[in-house]
Image: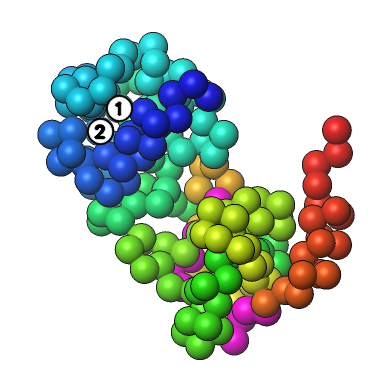
């Protein structure tokens, strides 16, 4: 995508700091497109066509328009308190979380916490979790016993772009995968071309 820096800035505005573009988000995280364009254009060149291209081409499908494209929001990952109208969903037996090795001591002790976000983000496959982990240094993958968590009463949500969300994952539901296990799962779960 040719607008990577602009997309990152939009992510900052729509997930964490709407005031950076002089806009407000409603209770569901929606921003008015015309206000977003006016606010962002004070710092970075943007048009409605560029915004549409960013939404369409974002590899993580971070953003959504409403039906008439007058509103836009980030699909998940907010640190500001919004309700993006997530629907509860029954997770698969296992989900995965990719992180950096530097965080494993804390995770092994406390489990997965949302830190500055509203939810912990989980992946349905190891290749996606691996990509996430690489962003944080030497990647480590945790297997989440999501079936047992759900049976124990922990609600799971599935965002419109396929990211699983949960308020936290206690350590008892986590298993740190060995490098050999990760390698085998990466091979098994790679998309077939």
Q: Which of marks 1 and 2 is nearer the N terminus?
A: 2
Residue 59 sits in quarter: top right
Q: In this view, does 14 lie to the left or right of 171?
A: left
Q: In this view, does 80 lie to the left or right of 99?
A: left
Q: Name the residue under label 1.
A: 71
Mark 1, residues whose alpha carbon is within 10 Å: few (<14), some, or many (≥20)? some
Q: Mark 2 points at which residue?
A: 31
Q: What element carries label 2?
A: strand
Q: Residue at x 50, y 74 (%)?
A: 103
Residue 129 image offset from top left, x and y in percent: 63, 57
Q: Nearer the viewer, residue 136 or 173?
A: 136
Q: Residue at x 77, y 65 (%)?
A: 182
Residue 148 sits in quarter: bottom right
Vertical comparison of 117 with 103: above or below: above
Q: Nearer the viewer, residue 106 or 113?
A: 106
In the image, the segment drawn in magenta is 163-175
Q: Are marks 1 and 2 in contact (CB under 8 Å)?
A: yes
Vertical comparison of 140 with 48: above or below: below
Residue 148 within the segment the image draws in magenta: no
Q: Residue at x 52, y 83 (%)?
A: 105
Q: Nearer the viewer, residue 93 or 184?
A: 184
Colour convention of the picture: rainbow
Residue 126 image offset from top left, x and y in percent: 71, 57
């Amino acid at each position: 995508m040719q607008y990577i820096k602009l997309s990152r800035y939009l992510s900052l505005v729509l997930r964490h700091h709407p005031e950076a573009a002089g806009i407000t988000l409603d209770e569901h995280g929606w921003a008015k497109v015309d206000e977003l364009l006016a606010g962002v254009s004070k710092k970075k060149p943007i048009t409605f066509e560029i915004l549409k291209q960013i939404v369409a081409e974002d590899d993580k499908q971070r953003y959504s328009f409403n039906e008439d494209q007058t509103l836009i929001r980030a699909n998940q990952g907010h640190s500001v308190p919004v309700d993006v109208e997530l629907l509860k969903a029954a997770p698969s037996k296992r989900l995965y979380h990719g992180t950096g090795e530097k965080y494993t001591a804390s995770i092994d002790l406390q489990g997965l916490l949302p830190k500055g976000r509203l939810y912990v983000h989980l992946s349905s496959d190891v290749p996606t979790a691996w990509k996430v982990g690489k962003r944080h240094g030497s990647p480590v993958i945790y297997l989440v016993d999501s079936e047992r968590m759900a049976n124990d009463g922990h609600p799971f949500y599935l965002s419109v772009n396929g990211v699983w969300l949960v308020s936290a994952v206690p350590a008892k539901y986590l298993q740190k995968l060995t490098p050999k296990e990760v390698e085998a799962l990466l091979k098994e779960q790679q998309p077939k071309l």
